[in-house]
Image: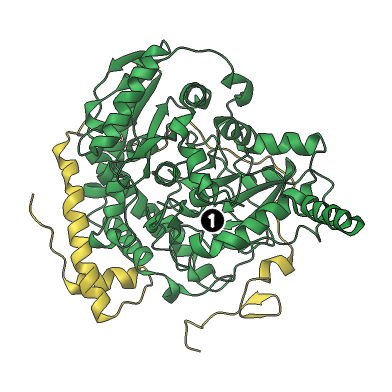
Amino acid sequence: MGRKKLSKEDVLHLARLAALTLNEEEAVKYKKQLEETISYIENLNELETSNISPTSHIIPITNIFFDDGEKNKRGLSLTEVFQNAKNKENNCFKVRKIFEE
Amino acid sequence: MQKIRKTIVLRLEKFLRNKQPMFLGKSLIFILELIKKKKVSTKEVIDYFLKRIDKYNSKINAYLTVNRTYNSCKLDKIGLPIAVKDNFCTKGIRTTASSKVLENFIPPYESTVTKRLLDASFFILGKTNLDAWAHGSSTETSDFGPTKNPWDLSRSSGGSSGGSAAAVSSYLAPATIGSETAGSIRQPAAWSGVIGLKPTYGRVSRYGLIAMASSLDCPGSITLTTEDAALILKIIAGKDKFDATTANWEVPDYLSELKKRRKFVIGVTEEYLEGVDEEIKEAFYRLIEILKKLGHQIKKIKLLSPKYSISVYTIIQRTEVSSNLARYDGIRYGNDRTFFGIEAKKRIMLGTYVLSYGYYDAYYKKAQKVRTLIIEDFKNVFKEVDIILAPTTPVTALKLGEFEKYPFFGELMDVLAEPAAIAGLCAISFPFGLKKKENLPIGLQLMGRWFEEENILNLTYQIEKETDFLGVIKKGIKNYPD
Protein backbone atom coordinates (compact mmCIF):
# COMPACT_ATOMS: atom_id res chain seq x y z
CA MET A 1 0.00 0.00 0.00
CA GLY A 2 1.71 3.17 -1.19
CA ARG A 3 1.63 6.30 0.82
CA LYS A 4 -0.74 8.90 -0.60
CA LYS A 5 0.87 12.22 -1.41
CA LEU A 6 -0.75 15.63 -1.09
CA SER A 7 0.89 18.94 -1.88
CA LYS A 8 0.68 21.93 0.40
CA GLU A 9 -1.35 23.61 -2.35
CA ASP A 10 -3.84 20.71 -2.24
CA VAL A 11 -4.32 21.29 1.47
CA LEU A 12 -4.80 25.03 1.04
CA HIS A 13 -7.24 24.39 -1.79
CA LEU A 14 -9.30 22.03 0.42
CA ALA A 15 -9.36 24.64 3.16
CA ARG A 16 -10.56 27.28 0.68
CA LEU A 17 -13.34 24.97 -0.55
CA ALA A 18 -14.49 24.48 3.04
CA ALA A 19 -14.20 28.21 3.87
CA LEU A 20 -11.50 27.57 6.46
CA THR A 21 -8.41 29.68 7.01
CA LEU A 22 -5.08 27.95 7.64
CA ASN A 23 -1.69 29.39 8.41
CA GLU A 24 1.56 27.94 7.00
CA GLU A 25 2.28 25.84 10.05
CA GLU A 26 -1.22 24.34 10.08
CA ALA A 27 -1.03 23.56 6.37
CA VAL A 28 2.17 21.56 6.86
CA LYS A 29 0.78 19.69 9.86
CA TYR A 30 -2.53 18.87 8.18
CA LYS A 31 -0.76 17.71 5.03
CA LYS A 32 1.10 15.04 7.00
CA GLN A 33 -1.95 13.94 9.01
CA LEU A 34 -4.28 13.84 6.02
CA GLU A 35 -1.75 11.75 4.09
CA GLU A 36 -1.54 9.26 6.95
CA THR A 37 -5.31 8.94 7.24
CA ILE A 38 -5.87 8.64 3.49
CA SER A 39 -3.20 5.93 3.29
CA TYR A 40 -4.93 3.97 6.06
CA ILE A 41 -8.42 4.04 4.56
CA GLU A 42 -7.13 2.53 1.33
CA ASN A 43 -7.32 -0.87 3.09
CA LEU A 44 -10.91 -1.01 1.85
CA ASN A 45 -9.50 -1.97 -1.55
CA GLU A 46 -8.65 -5.36 -0.04
CA LEU A 47 -12.39 -6.12 -0.16
CA GLU A 48 -14.16 -7.09 -3.39
CA THR A 49 -17.27 -4.94 -3.82
CA SER A 50 -17.97 -4.82 -7.58
CA ASN A 51 -21.37 -6.52 -7.22
CA ILE A 52 -22.37 -4.84 -3.98
CA SER A 53 -24.77 -1.92 -3.91
CA PRO A 54 -23.90 1.01 -1.64
CA THR A 55 -25.92 1.51 1.56
CA SER A 56 -28.26 4.48 1.42
CA HIS A 57 -29.98 3.84 4.72
CA ILE A 58 -29.61 1.16 7.36
CA ILE A 59 -33.32 0.52 7.84
CA PRO A 60 -35.88 0.25 5.04
CA ILE A 61 -37.43 3.70 5.02
CA THR A 62 -39.05 5.82 2.31
CA ASN A 63 -39.69 9.52 1.93
CA ILE A 64 -41.95 11.04 4.55
CA PHE A 65 -44.02 14.13 3.87
CA PHE A 66 -46.13 16.50 5.92
CA ASP A 67 -49.80 16.68 4.93
CA ASP A 68 -50.94 19.76 3.03
CA GLY A 69 -52.10 22.53 5.33
CA GLU A 70 -50.59 20.93 8.40
CA LYS A 71 -49.50 23.47 10.99
CA ASN A 72 -45.74 23.66 11.39
CA LYS A 73 -45.16 23.37 15.10
CA ARG A 74 -41.46 24.05 14.73
CA GLY A 75 -41.88 27.66 13.59
CA LEU A 76 -39.92 30.26 15.56
CA SER A 77 -40.94 33.82 16.36
CA LEU A 78 -38.85 36.64 14.85
CA THR A 79 -37.40 37.34 18.29
CA GLU A 80 -36.31 33.72 18.55
CA VAL A 81 -34.87 33.73 15.04
CA PHE A 82 -32.67 36.73 15.80
CA GLN A 83 -31.84 36.03 19.44
CA ASN A 84 -28.40 34.63 18.59
CA ALA A 85 -27.52 36.90 15.65
CA LYS A 86 -24.72 39.42 16.06
CA ASN A 87 -25.62 41.67 13.12
CA LYS A 88 -29.18 42.43 12.16
CA GLU A 89 -31.16 45.30 10.75
CA ASN A 90 -34.91 45.65 10.15
CA ASN A 91 -35.55 41.97 10.78
CA CYS A 92 -32.81 40.92 8.36
CA PHE A 93 -29.42 39.30 8.95
CA LYS A 94 -26.61 41.60 7.94
CA VAL A 95 -23.89 39.96 5.81
CA ARG A 96 -20.79 41.10 4.00
CA LYS A 97 -21.56 42.18 0.47
CA ILE A 98 -20.23 39.90 -2.23
CA PHE A 99 -21.02 42.00 -5.33
CA GLU A 100 -19.62 45.41 -6.18
CA GLU A 101 -22.22 48.05 -6.95
CA MET B 1 -27.11 19.42 84.27
CA GLN B 2 -29.91 21.40 82.68
CA LYS B 3 -27.37 23.26 80.59
CA ILE B 4 -25.68 20.09 79.38
CA ARG B 5 -29.00 18.58 78.40
CA LYS B 6 -29.88 21.72 76.46
CA THR B 7 -26.56 21.58 74.59
CA ILE B 8 -27.14 17.94 73.66
CA VAL B 9 -30.64 18.68 72.37
CA LEU B 10 -29.35 21.60 70.34
CA ARG B 11 -26.57 19.50 68.87
CA LEU B 12 -28.97 16.75 67.99
CA GLU B 13 -31.32 19.20 66.32
CA LYS B 14 -28.45 20.64 64.34
CA PHE B 15 -27.35 17.16 63.31
CA LEU B 16 -30.83 16.27 62.11
CA ARG B 17 -31.10 19.53 60.20
CA ASN B 18 -27.80 18.98 58.42
CA LYS B 19 -28.31 15.30 57.86
CA GLN B 20 -27.86 14.50 54.20
CA PRO B 21 -30.61 12.50 52.60
CA MET B 22 -29.21 9.04 51.91
CA PHE B 23 -28.94 9.20 48.15
CA LEU B 24 -25.31 8.46 47.46
CA GLY B 25 -25.11 6.00 44.59
CA LYS B 26 -28.87 5.52 44.37
CA SER B 27 -30.50 4.90 41.01
CA LEU B 28 -33.05 7.16 39.30
CA ILE B 29 -35.79 4.65 40.03
CA PHE B 30 -34.87 4.57 43.72
CA ILE B 31 -34.97 8.38 43.94
CA LEU B 32 -38.28 8.44 42.09
CA GLU B 33 -39.75 6.07 44.68
CA LEU B 34 -38.47 8.25 47.54
CA ILE B 35 -40.13 11.30 46.00
CA LYS B 36 -43.37 9.47 45.31
CA LYS B 37 -43.55 8.21 48.90
CA LYS B 38 -42.83 11.77 50.03
CA LYS B 39 -39.75 10.60 51.95
CA VAL B 40 -37.90 13.45 50.31
CA SER B 41 -38.84 16.56 48.35
CA THR B 42 -37.74 17.30 44.81
CA LYS B 43 -35.97 20.41 46.04
CA GLU B 44 -33.87 18.34 48.43
CA VAL B 45 -32.89 16.00 45.61
CA ILE B 46 -31.91 18.80 43.22
CA ASP B 47 -30.04 20.69 45.96
CA TYR B 48 -28.19 17.51 46.86
CA PHE B 49 -26.83 17.11 43.34
CA LEU B 50 -26.05 20.83 42.92
CA LYS B 51 -24.05 20.64 46.15
CA ARG B 52 -22.10 17.65 44.85
CA ILE B 53 -21.47 19.43 41.55
CA ASP B 54 -20.12 22.44 43.48
CA LYS B 55 -17.88 20.15 45.48
CA TYR B 56 -16.40 18.03 42.70
CA ASN B 57 -16.95 19.51 39.25
CA SER B 58 -13.89 21.78 39.33
CA LYS B 59 -11.77 18.61 39.70
CA ILE B 60 -13.51 16.52 37.07
CA ASN B 61 -14.87 19.09 34.58
CA ALA B 62 -17.89 16.96 33.73
CA TYR B 63 -20.31 19.91 33.47
CA LEU B 64 -19.93 22.92 31.18
CA THR B 65 -23.14 24.58 32.33
CA VAL B 66 -25.02 24.02 35.59
CA ASN B 67 -28.73 24.82 35.62
CA ARG B 68 -29.54 26.68 38.83
CA THR B 69 -33.00 27.81 37.84
CA TYR B 70 -34.78 25.19 39.91
CA ASN B 71 -35.96 27.53 42.65
CA SER B 72 -37.35 30.06 40.18
CA CYS B 73 -39.01 27.65 37.77
CA LYS B 74 -42.56 26.65 38.44
CA LEU B 75 -42.55 22.91 38.68
CA ASP B 76 -45.82 21.19 39.16
CA LYS B 77 -44.12 17.95 38.28
CA ILE B 78 -41.66 15.72 40.08
CA GLY B 79 -38.36 17.07 38.79
CA LEU B 80 -36.22 13.97 38.56
CA PRO B 81 -32.58 15.04 38.03
CA ILE B 82 -30.68 14.19 34.85
CA ALA B 83 -27.75 15.79 33.01
CA VAL B 84 -27.56 16.10 29.24
CA LYS B 85 -24.61 16.11 26.85
CA ASP B 86 -24.01 19.62 25.57
CA ASN B 87 -24.81 18.79 21.96
CA PHE B 88 -28.57 18.53 22.61
CA CYS B 89 -30.38 21.82 22.10
CA THR B 90 -32.06 22.87 25.34
CA LYS B 91 -34.36 25.85 25.02
CA GLY B 92 -33.01 28.75 27.05
CA ILE B 93 -29.97 26.80 28.32
CA ARG B 94 -26.63 27.47 26.63
CA THR B 95 -25.63 24.70 24.19
CA THR B 96 -22.05 24.74 22.91
CA ALA B 97 -21.17 21.30 21.50
CA SER B 98 -17.92 22.13 23.41
CA SER B 99 -16.89 24.47 20.59
CA LYS B 100 -16.04 28.17 20.76
CA VAL B 101 -18.15 28.54 17.62
CA LEU B 102 -21.26 28.08 19.77
CA GLU B 103 -19.79 29.54 22.95
CA ASN B 104 -22.80 31.81 23.58
CA PHE B 105 -25.51 29.94 21.69
CA ILE B 106 -28.89 29.84 23.46
CA PRO B 107 -31.15 27.48 21.50
CA PRO B 108 -34.59 28.88 20.67
CA TYR B 109 -36.04 25.36 20.61
CA GLU B 110 -35.94 22.09 22.53
CA SER B 111 -34.51 18.82 21.16
CA THR B 112 -37.00 15.93 21.04
CA VAL B 113 -34.99 13.92 23.58
CA THR B 114 -34.95 16.71 26.17
CA LYS B 115 -38.57 17.64 25.37
CA ARG B 116 -39.64 14.08 26.14
CA LEU B 117 -37.61 14.05 29.35
CA LEU B 118 -39.10 17.36 30.50
CA ASP B 119 -42.58 16.10 29.66
CA ALA B 120 -41.84 13.01 31.76
CA SER B 121 -41.04 15.18 34.84
CA PHE B 122 -37.27 15.38 34.55
CA PHE B 123 -35.22 18.40 35.57
CA ILE B 124 -32.03 19.12 33.59
CA LEU B 125 -29.21 19.58 36.11
CA GLY B 126 -26.79 20.83 33.51
CA LYS B 127 -24.97 20.25 30.26
CA THR B 128 -22.00 17.91 30.12
CA ASN B 129 -18.65 18.19 28.36
CA LEU B 130 -17.76 16.41 25.12
CA ASP B 131 -15.12 16.48 22.41
CA ALA B 132 -15.83 19.59 20.32
CA TRP B 133 -18.70 18.65 17.95
CA ALA B 134 -18.34 15.13 19.43
CA HIS B 135 -15.18 14.67 17.30
CA GLY B 136 -13.00 12.42 19.40
CA SER B 137 -12.75 9.70 22.02
CA SER B 138 -11.25 11.54 24.99
CA THR B 139 -12.94 15.00 25.41
CA GLU B 140 -9.46 16.42 24.77
CA THR B 141 -10.69 18.27 21.70
CA SER B 142 -13.22 20.18 23.86
CA ASP B 143 -12.59 23.92 23.68
CA PHE B 144 -13.40 24.02 27.40
CA GLY B 145 -10.78 21.54 28.61
CA PRO B 146 -10.93 17.75 28.98
CA THR B 147 -13.08 15.83 31.44
CA LYS B 148 -10.94 13.87 33.91
CA ASN B 149 -11.61 10.24 34.62
CA PRO B 150 -13.11 10.01 38.14
CA TRP B 151 -11.11 6.80 38.70
CA ASP B 152 -7.79 8.55 37.99
CA LEU B 153 -7.74 12.29 37.38
CA SER B 154 -4.63 12.04 35.17
CA ARG B 155 -6.60 9.91 32.70
CA SER B 156 -9.31 10.49 30.12
CA SER B 157 -12.90 9.63 30.90
CA GLY B 158 -13.25 8.63 27.25
CA GLY B 159 -15.37 10.37 24.67
CA SER B 160 -17.05 11.91 23.10
CA SER B 161 -19.70 11.63 25.88
CA GLY B 162 -16.91 11.83 28.49
CA GLY B 163 -18.66 14.46 30.62
CA SER B 164 -21.84 12.38 30.74
CA ALA B 165 -19.95 9.22 31.75
CA ALA B 166 -17.80 10.96 34.39
CA ALA B 167 -20.85 12.73 35.88
CA VAL B 168 -22.52 9.37 36.49
CA SER B 169 -19.45 7.53 37.78
CA SER B 170 -18.71 10.31 40.31
CA TYR B 171 -22.44 10.65 41.04
CA LEU B 172 -22.76 14.28 40.00
CA ALA B 173 -25.96 13.06 38.33
CA PRO B 174 -27.88 9.82 38.86
CA ALA B 175 -28.06 9.37 35.07
CA THR B 176 -27.15 11.27 31.92
CA ILE B 177 -27.98 11.49 28.23
CA GLY B 178 -25.17 10.95 25.74
CA SER B 179 -24.97 10.54 22.01
CA GLU B 180 -23.07 8.00 19.97
CA THR B 181 -21.86 8.14 16.41
CA ALA B 182 -19.45 5.23 16.77
CA GLY B 183 -18.41 4.44 20.32
CA SER B 184 -19.16 7.79 21.94
CA ILE B 185 -21.51 6.32 24.57
CA ARG B 186 -20.04 2.85 25.03
CA GLN B 187 -16.35 3.78 25.15
CA PRO B 188 -16.60 6.51 27.86
CA ALA B 189 -19.03 4.30 29.82
CA ALA B 190 -16.46 1.48 29.71
CA TRP B 191 -13.56 3.72 30.76
CA SER B 192 -15.57 5.39 33.53
CA GLY B 193 -17.08 2.17 34.88
CA VAL B 194 -20.79 2.75 34.20
CA ILE B 195 -23.51 1.48 31.84
CA GLY B 196 -23.81 3.00 28.36
CA LEU B 197 -26.70 2.15 26.04
CA LYS B 198 -26.58 2.97 22.34
CA PRO B 199 -30.00 2.18 20.86
CA THR B 200 -30.61 1.15 17.24
CA TYR B 201 -30.21 3.95 14.71
CA GLY B 202 -33.68 5.41 14.21
CA ARG B 203 -34.99 4.23 17.59
CA VAL B 204 -34.48 7.68 19.17
CA SER B 205 -35.04 11.03 17.47
CA ARG B 206 -32.07 13.14 16.43
CA TYR B 207 -34.14 16.33 16.23
CA GLY B 208 -32.23 19.06 18.05
CA LEU B 209 -29.10 16.94 18.45
CA ILE B 210 -26.32 18.99 16.88
CA ALA B 211 -25.57 16.95 13.77
CA MET B 212 -22.22 15.22 13.47
CA ALA B 213 -22.67 12.27 11.09
CA SER B 214 -26.38 12.09 10.38
CA SER B 215 -26.47 8.50 9.13
CA LEU B 216 -24.86 7.28 12.38
CA ASP B 217 -25.81 9.69 15.21
CA CYS B 218 -27.89 8.15 17.97
CA PRO B 219 -28.94 9.48 21.39
CA GLY B 220 -28.68 7.10 24.36
CA SER B 221 -28.20 6.92 28.11
CA ILE B 222 -25.44 6.49 30.69
CA THR B 223 -26.67 5.03 33.97
CA LEU B 224 -25.79 3.16 37.17
CA THR B 225 -28.34 0.39 36.68
CA THR B 226 -29.91 -1.55 33.83
CA GLU B 227 -33.36 -0.58 35.10
CA ASP B 228 -32.55 3.11 34.71
CA ALA B 229 -31.37 2.49 31.13
CA ALA B 230 -34.70 0.75 30.43
CA LEU B 231 -36.68 3.58 32.06
CA ILE B 232 -34.94 6.30 30.04
CA LEU B 233 -35.14 4.43 26.74
CA LYS B 234 -38.89 3.97 27.14
CA ILE B 235 -39.23 7.74 27.51
CA ILE B 236 -36.97 8.91 24.68
CA ALA B 237 -37.62 6.18 22.08
CA GLY B 238 -40.17 6.18 19.30
CA LYS B 239 -41.33 7.85 16.13
CA ASP B 240 -40.80 11.60 15.92
CA LYS B 241 -42.45 13.72 13.29
CA PHE B 242 -39.45 16.04 13.28
CA ASP B 243 -36.94 13.30 12.43
CA ALA B 244 -37.94 11.44 9.28
CA THR B 245 -35.33 8.74 9.98
CA THR B 246 -37.03 7.59 13.19
CA ALA B 247 -38.68 4.21 12.81
CA ASN B 248 -42.35 3.56 13.28
CA TRP B 249 -41.72 0.37 15.26
CA GLU B 250 -43.62 -0.11 18.50
CA VAL B 251 -41.69 0.78 21.67
CA PRO B 252 -41.90 -2.12 24.17
CA ASP B 253 -42.15 -1.62 27.91
CA TYR B 254 -38.45 -2.17 28.49
CA LEU B 255 -38.78 -2.27 32.29
CA SER B 256 -41.20 -5.19 32.35
CA GLU B 257 -39.17 -6.88 29.58
CA LEU B 258 -36.22 -6.94 32.01
CA LYS B 259 -37.97 -9.21 34.45
CA LYS B 260 -38.56 -12.08 32.01
CA ARG B 261 -36.20 -14.99 32.55
CA ARG B 262 -34.90 -15.43 29.04
CA LYS B 263 -32.21 -17.66 27.57
CA PHE B 264 -30.12 -16.45 24.65
CA VAL B 265 -27.73 -17.81 22.07
CA ILE B 266 -24.66 -15.59 22.45
CA GLY B 267 -22.03 -15.24 19.74
CA VAL B 268 -18.34 -14.67 20.44
CA THR B 269 -15.66 -14.01 17.85
CA GLU B 270 -11.86 -14.04 17.67
CA GLU B 271 -11.83 -10.93 15.48
CA TYR B 272 -12.83 -8.79 18.45
CA LEU B 273 -9.99 -10.03 20.67
CA GLU B 274 -7.08 -9.09 18.45
CA GLY B 275 -4.77 -6.66 20.25
CA VAL B 276 -7.02 -6.59 23.32
CA ASP B 277 -5.43 -6.21 26.77
CA GLU B 278 -4.92 -9.54 28.58
CA GLU B 279 -6.92 -8.60 31.66
CA ILE B 280 -9.85 -7.43 29.50
CA LYS B 281 -9.72 -10.82 27.74
CA GLU B 282 -9.73 -12.56 31.14
CA ALA B 283 -12.85 -10.60 32.13
CA PHE B 284 -14.45 -11.61 28.82
CA TYR B 285 -13.75 -15.33 29.38
CA ARG B 286 -14.87 -15.08 32.99
CA LEU B 287 -18.23 -13.67 31.87
CA ILE B 288 -18.63 -16.45 29.28
CA GLU B 289 -18.41 -19.04 32.10
CA ILE B 290 -21.01 -17.15 34.13
CA LEU B 291 -23.35 -16.91 31.13
CA LYS B 292 -23.03 -20.66 30.53
CA LYS B 293 -23.87 -21.27 34.18
CA LEU B 294 -26.97 -19.08 33.78
CA GLY B 295 -28.11 -21.42 31.00
CA HIS B 296 -27.22 -19.38 27.93
CA GLN B 297 -25.66 -20.99 24.90
CA ILE B 298 -22.29 -19.69 23.70
CA LYS B 299 -21.54 -20.00 20.00
CA LYS B 300 -18.36 -19.21 18.06
CA ILE B 301 -19.02 -16.91 15.10
CA LYS B 302 -16.98 -15.26 12.39
CA LEU B 303 -17.24 -11.56 11.56
CA LEU B 304 -15.42 -9.19 9.22
CA SER B 305 -12.34 -7.70 10.84
CA PRO B 306 -13.21 -4.47 12.68
CA LYS B 307 -10.21 -2.82 10.97
CA TYR B 308 -12.35 -2.22 7.88
CA SER B 309 -14.95 -0.50 10.03
CA ILE B 310 -12.35 2.10 10.98
CA SER B 311 -11.91 3.02 7.32
CA VAL B 312 -15.63 2.99 6.53
CA TYR B 313 -16.33 5.08 9.58
CA THR B 314 -13.53 7.53 8.86
CA ILE B 315 -14.80 8.16 5.34
CA ILE B 316 -18.52 8.35 6.11
CA GLN B 317 -18.11 10.36 9.27
CA ARG B 318 -15.76 12.93 7.69
CA THR B 319 -17.96 13.43 4.63
CA GLU B 320 -21.08 13.95 6.73
CA VAL B 321 -19.15 16.26 9.06
CA SER B 322 -17.92 18.41 6.19
CA SER B 323 -21.48 18.80 5.02
CA ASN B 324 -23.08 19.27 8.47
CA LEU B 325 -20.54 21.81 9.68
CA ALA B 326 -20.96 23.89 6.52
CA ARG B 327 -23.94 25.59 8.18
CA TYR B 328 -21.80 27.38 10.77
CA ASP B 329 -21.31 30.72 9.06
CA GLY B 330 -21.57 32.98 12.12
CA ILE B 331 -24.37 34.94 10.47
CA ARG B 332 -27.54 33.62 12.06
CA TYR B 333 -25.99 32.40 15.29
CA GLY B 334 -22.62 31.53 16.77
CA ASN B 335 -19.14 32.73 15.86
CA ASP B 336 -17.59 32.52 12.39
CA ARG B 337 -15.52 29.65 10.97
CA THR B 338 -12.19 30.93 12.30
CA PHE B 339 -13.38 29.64 15.69
CA PHE B 340 -13.22 25.97 14.62
CA GLY B 341 -10.59 23.95 16.49
CA ILE B 342 -7.84 21.82 14.96
CA GLU B 343 -9.77 18.52 14.94
CA ALA B 344 -12.93 19.94 13.36
CA LYS B 345 -10.89 21.63 10.61
CA LYS B 346 -9.02 18.43 9.89
CA ARG B 347 -12.21 16.42 9.64
CA ILE B 348 -13.95 18.98 7.45
CA MET B 349 -10.97 18.98 5.08
CA LEU B 350 -10.74 15.20 4.84
CA GLY B 351 -14.48 15.04 4.17
CA THR B 352 -14.15 17.69 1.50
CA TYR B 353 -11.28 15.72 -0.06
CA VAL B 354 -13.03 12.34 -0.25
CA LEU B 355 -16.18 13.96 -1.67
CA SER B 356 -14.34 16.00 -4.27
CA TYR B 357 -14.48 15.36 -8.00
CA GLY B 358 -12.58 12.25 -9.01
CA TYR B 359 -12.41 10.81 -5.48
CA TYR B 360 -16.08 10.30 -4.71
CA ASP B 361 -16.25 6.78 -6.20
CA ALA B 362 -12.88 5.70 -4.83
CA TYR B 363 -13.66 6.65 -1.25
CA TYR B 364 -17.26 7.55 -0.45
CA LYS B 365 -19.00 5.07 -2.70
CA LYS B 366 -16.50 2.35 -1.81
CA ALA B 367 -17.13 2.99 1.89
CA GLN B 368 -20.92 2.77 1.43
CA LYS B 369 -20.43 -0.54 -0.41
CA VAL B 370 -18.29 -1.95 2.39
CA ARG B 371 -20.96 -0.68 4.78
CA THR B 372 -23.39 -2.97 2.95
CA LEU B 373 -20.92 -5.85 3.46
CA ILE B 374 -20.74 -5.11 7.19
CA ILE B 375 -24.55 -4.99 7.49
CA GLU B 376 -24.92 -8.28 5.56
CA ASP B 377 -22.22 -9.83 7.73
CA PHE B 378 -24.20 -9.00 10.89
CA LYS B 379 -27.48 -10.13 9.30
CA ASN B 380 -25.99 -13.55 8.62
CA VAL B 381 -24.56 -13.90 12.10
CA PHE B 382 -27.84 -12.84 13.70
CA LYS B 383 -29.54 -15.78 11.99
CA GLU B 384 -27.53 -18.02 14.32
CA VAL B 385 -27.23 -15.95 17.49
CA ASP B 386 -29.40 -13.46 19.41
CA ILE B 387 -26.64 -11.36 20.91
CA ILE B 388 -22.90 -10.84 20.33
CA LEU B 389 -20.59 -10.45 23.34
CA ALA B 390 -17.24 -8.62 23.01
CA PRO B 391 -14.93 -6.28 24.89
CA THR B 392 -15.97 -2.61 24.50
CA THR B 393 -12.43 -1.24 24.20
CA PRO B 394 -9.02 -2.80 23.51
CA VAL B 395 -7.45 -1.07 26.55
CA THR B 396 -8.60 0.66 29.77
CA ALA B 397 -8.56 4.47 30.18
CA LEU B 398 -5.50 6.19 28.71
CA LYS B 399 -3.58 9.11 30.17
CA LEU B 400 -4.63 12.55 28.99
CA GLY B 401 -2.28 13.60 26.20
CA GLU B 402 -1.71 10.11 24.78
CA PHE B 403 -4.26 10.68 22.04
CA GLU B 404 -2.31 13.46 20.38
CA LYS B 405 0.39 11.11 19.15
CA TYR B 406 -1.66 9.71 16.29
CA PRO B 407 -3.86 11.34 13.64
CA PHE B 408 -6.82 9.18 14.36
CA PHE B 409 -5.88 7.37 17.50
CA GLY B 410 -9.43 7.83 18.79
CA GLU B 411 -10.72 5.58 16.02
CA LEU B 412 -8.39 2.83 17.22
CA MET B 413 -9.92 3.14 20.70
CA ASP B 414 -13.35 2.80 19.12
CA VAL B 415 -12.42 -0.09 16.84
CA LEU B 416 -14.63 -2.60 18.70
CA ALA B 417 -17.58 -0.21 18.85
CA GLU B 418 -17.53 0.97 15.25
CA PRO B 419 -18.89 -2.09 13.38
CA ALA B 420 -22.18 -2.08 15.34
CA ALA B 421 -22.52 1.68 14.84
CA ILE B 422 -21.93 1.44 11.10
CA ALA B 423 -24.58 -1.28 10.85
CA GLY B 424 -26.91 0.75 13.11
CA LEU B 425 -27.28 -2.06 15.68
CA CYS B 426 -28.19 -1.54 19.32
CA ALA B 427 -25.42 -2.19 21.85
CA ILE B 428 -24.72 -1.75 25.54
CA SER B 429 -21.49 -1.52 27.53
CA PHE B 430 -21.28 -2.41 31.22
CA PRO B 431 -18.39 -2.62 33.68
CA PHE B 432 -16.96 -6.02 34.48
CA GLY B 433 -14.10 -5.89 36.95
CA LEU B 434 -11.01 -3.75 37.27
CA LYS B 435 -7.56 -3.83 35.73
CA LYS B 436 -5.58 -4.69 38.83
CA LYS B 437 -2.43 -2.59 38.88
CA GLU B 438 -4.02 0.59 37.55
CA ASN B 439 -7.36 0.04 39.34
CA LEU B 440 -9.32 1.04 36.22
CA PRO B 441 -12.71 -0.26 35.03
CA ILE B 442 -12.97 -2.87 32.29
CA GLY B 443 -15.97 -2.66 29.94
CA LEU B 444 -17.68 -5.46 28.03
CA GLN B 445 -20.44 -4.99 25.47
CA LEU B 446 -23.47 -6.78 24.08
CA MET B 447 -24.63 -6.09 20.52
CA GLY B 448 -28.19 -6.94 19.55
CA ARG B 449 -30.32 -7.12 16.42
CA TRP B 450 -31.92 -3.96 15.05
CA PHE B 451 -34.71 -2.73 17.38
CA GLU B 452 -34.17 -5.52 19.91
CA GLU B 453 -32.94 -3.34 22.77
CA GLU B 454 -35.10 -5.42 25.14
CA ASN B 455 -32.80 -8.43 24.52
CA ILE B 456 -29.50 -6.75 25.36
CA LEU B 457 -31.12 -4.97 28.33
CA ASN B 458 -32.56 -8.28 29.56
CA LEU B 459 -29.18 -10.01 29.44
CA THR B 460 -27.38 -7.04 31.05
CA TYR B 461 -29.96 -7.16 33.84
CA GLN B 462 -29.29 -10.89 34.35
CA ILE B 463 -25.55 -10.16 34.54
CA GLU B 464 -26.21 -7.32 37.02
CA LYS B 465 -28.36 -9.57 39.23
CA GLU B 466 -25.81 -12.39 39.14
CA THR B 467 -22.57 -10.41 39.54
CA ASP B 468 -23.40 -6.78 40.47
CA PHE B 469 -20.83 -5.98 37.72
CA LEU B 470 -18.21 -7.23 40.20
CA GLY B 471 -18.87 -4.23 42.43
CA VAL B 472 -17.28 -1.72 40.03
CA ILE B 473 -20.03 0.94 40.04
CA LYS B 474 -20.34 1.10 43.83
CA LYS B 475 -16.57 1.17 44.26
CA GLY B 476 -16.28 4.12 41.84
CA ILE B 477 -18.80 6.24 43.72
CA LYS B 478 -17.10 5.51 47.06
CA ASN B 479 -14.24 7.75 45.95
CA TYR B 480 -16.64 10.71 45.96
CA PRO B 481 -18.32 10.84 49.39
CA ASP B 482 -20.93 13.49 50.21
Tell me which residue sits at (55%, 74%) in the image.
B331
Q: Quadrant of residue B90?
A: bottom right
Residue B469 x, y percent position in the rendering: 45, 31
- Chain under numbered label 1: B
Chain B: colour as depicted: green
For label 1, the residue is: B87
Q: Is residue B353 visible?
A: yes
Viewed as shown, does residue B454 lie left or right of B264? right
Residue B456 x, y percent position in the rendering: 47, 25
Tell me which residue sits at (25%, 46%) in the image.
B311
Chain A: colour as depicted: yellow
The one nearer the camera, B328 or B174, is B174
Viewed as shown, does residue B230 lie left or right of B279? right
- Looking at the image, is A47 positioned above or below residue B114? above
- Looking at the image, is B294 positioned above or below residue B321? above
Viewed as shown, does residue B453 lie left or right of A21? right
Q: Can residue B208 be seen in this view?
A: no
Residue B353 x, y percent position in the rendering: 27, 60
Dot 1: element: loop
Tell me which residue sits at (47%, 57%) in the image.
B130
Q: In which quarter of the image is the N terminus of chain B?
A: bottom right
